[in-house]
């Protein structure tokens, strides 16, 4: 993994990437259950 | 990835597998206190894995922290949708939730399966009890342990477990 390939994105872009990802149903269920609090800085690494 | 990995953002999303030779350290970047989010949509393998205080961490796959996994950060959560494996699990009071079981040789703490209803009965514990496990550590101390003791020890290039 190349750290330089992380992209600084907005909250909306972060949410969209997660929404359109191939995350498993199990993950989505747990993520909804925990409903994690988000912050100010969002980093994204796509397509490894 | 060679070397260590430190979370680059307060909230980090990685799509795909993550293989790190050294330590995966989710300590927040400078300027941030505790909290945050870390998601890997894939398998994670590394030498050692550290969560962060108040951070929600999700691995949508297997998590294999070969030598050490430290989950004992207050107000944090660690969720692994498939299997968790490590040689030493340190999760005092902070469990990990797993979708497909866990394998831990030594440790202090436990994992719980998704959907647990009776934590005490369903807890997945290390192969060896806490006393035996802590006696294996080559940290120079076994009481009042904190995650930073493990981190500092490993970053100094020291061995985690005593030689047999």
Image (cartoon, grey):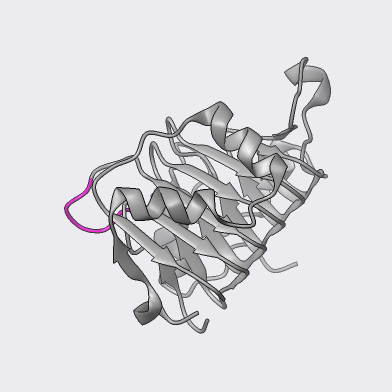
**Most common secondary structure along the magenta stretch:** loop
Q: Work out whether residue B92 can be spotted.
A: no
Q: Is residue A7 magenta?
A: no
Is B22 located above or below residue B87 in the figure? below
Q: Which residue is drawn at the image coordinates 43% and 32% (left, top)?
A: B74
Q: Position of residue B143 (x, y in %)?
A: 49, 38
Q: Work out whether residue B147 can be spotted.
A: yes
Task: Locate residue B115: give its quadrant.
Answer: top right
Is B67 located above or below residue B31 in the figure? below
In the visual, does B17 lie left or right of B62? left
Q: Position of residue B118 (x, y in %)?
A: 78, 15
Work out which quarter of the rendered image holds the C terminus of chain B and state it.
Answer: bottom right
The one nearer the camera, B27 or B104, is: B27
Is A6 located above or below residue B100 in the figure? below
In the visual, does B47 lie left or right of B119? left
In the visual, does A12 lie left or right of B42? left
Q: Which residue is drawn at the image coordinates 42% and 48% (left, top)?
A: A15
Question: Which residue reaches farthest top?
Answer: B118
**Magenta segment boundaries in residue numbering:** B27-32
Task: Locate residue B29: give its quadrant.
Answer: bottom left
Q: Which residue is drawn at the image coordinates 51% and 39% (left, top)?
A: B72
Number of numbered discs on residues: 0
Q: Position of residue B87 (x, y in %)?
A: 72, 57
Q: Position of residue B125 (x, y in %)?
A: 77, 36
Q: Is residue B31 magenta?
A: yes
Is B93 located above or below residue B9 in the figure? above
């Amino acid at each position: 993994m190349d750290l330089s390939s992380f992209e600084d994105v907005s909250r909306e872009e972060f949410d969209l990437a997660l929404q359109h990802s191939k995350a498993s149903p199990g993950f989505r269920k747990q993520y909804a259950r925990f409903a994690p609090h988000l912050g100010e800085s969002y980093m994204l690494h796509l397509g490894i | 990835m060679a070397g260590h990995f430190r979370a680059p953002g307060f909230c980090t999303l990685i799509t795909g597998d993550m293989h790190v030779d050294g330590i995966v350290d989710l300590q927040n970047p400078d300027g941030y206190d505790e909290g945050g989010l870390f998601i890997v949509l894939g398998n994670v393998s590394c030498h050692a894995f550290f969560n962060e205080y108040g951070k929600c961490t999700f691995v949508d796959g297997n998590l294999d922290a070969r030598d050490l996994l430290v989950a004992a950060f207050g107000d944090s959560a660690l969720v692994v949708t498939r299997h968790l494996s490590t040689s030493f699990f340190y999760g005092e009071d902070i469990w990990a939730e797993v979708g497909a079981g866990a394998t831990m040789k030594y440790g202090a703490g436990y994992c719980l399966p998704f959907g647990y209803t009776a934590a005490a009965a369903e807890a997945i514990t290390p192969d060896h009890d806490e006393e035996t496990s802590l006696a294996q550590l080559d940290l120079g101390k076994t009481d009042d342990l904190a995650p930073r003791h493990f981190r500092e020890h490993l970053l100094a290039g020291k061995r985690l477990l005593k030689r047999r």
